[in-house]
Image (cartoon, grey):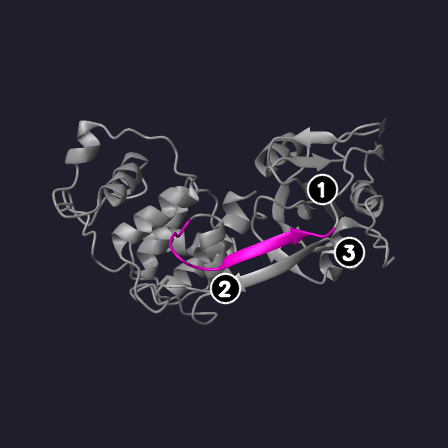
Amino acid sequence: MTDIKWMYEYGVSTGNAYQTSWSQKYWPNWDIPYTGGWCLSYVDNAYISAGANQLNHVYPTATAWWNGAKKKHLGVPPLGIEVPIYFTLVGEPAGHAAIRRADGSVVSASQSGNHQHPYVHKSIQDLLNFYGTVWDIKYIGWAEDVRDNPVVNQVATHTEYSYNPNSNVTRQQMAMFLYRLAGKPAFTPSSQDINRFTDLNGVDEQFKKAIYWLNHEGITTGVDSNRFNPNGSVTRAQMASFMYRLANSPIPVSASGFTDISGLGSDFATAINWLKQVNVTTGLTSTKFNPKGAVTREQMAAFMHRLYCYVLGK
């Protein structure tokens, strides 16, 4: 259910589901001095100075705090609350911690030396860009507590969900999921985009736009030269190919160990191997991927969530 909840919170799926209310128990006093390199100390002090000092379990590093956090979430925090967030750094096991503010910006001990004010990043992605010139950094998620002390409370969650988790994902739904996952980039389809597929009559305009975008970006080539098959079910092999292209077809790709993909075209096999390599899939078993099987909406939520956390959110 966490993956489906993320689909709604991140805007990949829409509709009535998981209406969660949060209250801020301690608003961090984030505009405080810090020493570069002591990111967790900065985060701790921001909340402690606001009153979050009932419990005093001191973690030595950001990674230790994340591993010990009582309630943590993958993905981006909801707007309106101010919570600690965690990043991994390749080659630096201590990791990195910062505070995501209510407006989506991030405050962080991001510079070396002593400073009277924290470094303010416009967004999580802005912080990733800042550090990306020095570190191989990846955003992981957010927690509800600092030093084992809750800084936010989940007030109420009511579930009115009509996600249809056991239904198969159609190709037009897949197009929409990918378009939203990419952040719904500004896009005006050309006449060539619009005329590319001849089987989109009756498809809702918002889905058409997503399909046009998918074709324009080279993420889909259709089922043949002029058809997209919008109501057809997405197979696991097709899903892998869509995601691989969305991630700009990275290389190199190592073998996955799946024994049931040898009869596929090289493009599909490469995409499936990559999906395993980046931990978006573990397969049905360690040796079986079931490439021709249909993808359910519940399974797609898990794939999308992992794709964001392990690849696109880096």
Q: Is residue 150 left or right of residue 161?
A: right
Q: Nearer the viewer, residue 281 or 16?
A: 16
Res 169 visible: yes
From the viewer's side, name the closer residue of 63 and 205.
205
Which residue range is magenta in the image? 12-25
Asked whether disc 1 touches disc 2, contact meaning CB atoms under 8 Å apart, the reply is no
Q: Position of residue 164 (x, y in %)?
A: 34, 65
Q: Earlier in the sequence, mark 2 or mark 3?
A: 3
Placement of 77 over or under 169, stated as above or below: above
Residue at the spot 83% in from the left edge and 27% down from the top edge: 115
Residue 205 position by quadrant: top left
Mark toward the viewer: 2 or 3: 2
Q: Position of residue 26 (x, y in %)?
A: 75, 49
Q: CA distance from mark 1 to mark 3?
A: 14 Å
- Is residue 127 highlighted in magenta? no
Question: Tags 1 and 3 in contact by the CB under 8 Å rule?
Answer: no
Residue at the spot of label 2: 158
Query: Which secondary structure lies at badge 1?
Result: strand
Camera-side residue of 147 and 314: 147
Residue ID at (32%, 35%)? 217
Q: Please give the name of the residue rendered at 30% of the width and 52% of the height, measured from the top-left corner.
A: 173
Q: Which residue is mark 3?
A: 64
Instruction: Compute the Cα span from label 1 to label 2.
Output: 30 Å
Mark 3 element type: helix
Mark whose residue sits in front, 1 or 3 = 1
Q: Tell us which disc is closer to us: 1 or 2.
A: 2
- Pick whichever of labels 1 and 3 is earlier in the sequence: 3
Determine which residue is flagged by label 1.
Answer: 98
Q: Quadrant of the C terminus?
A: top right
Instruction: Look at the image and tell me whether residue 254 can be seen.
Output: no
Instruction: Categorize mark 3 by other alpha carbons within 10 Å: few (<14), some (14-19), many (20+).
Output: some
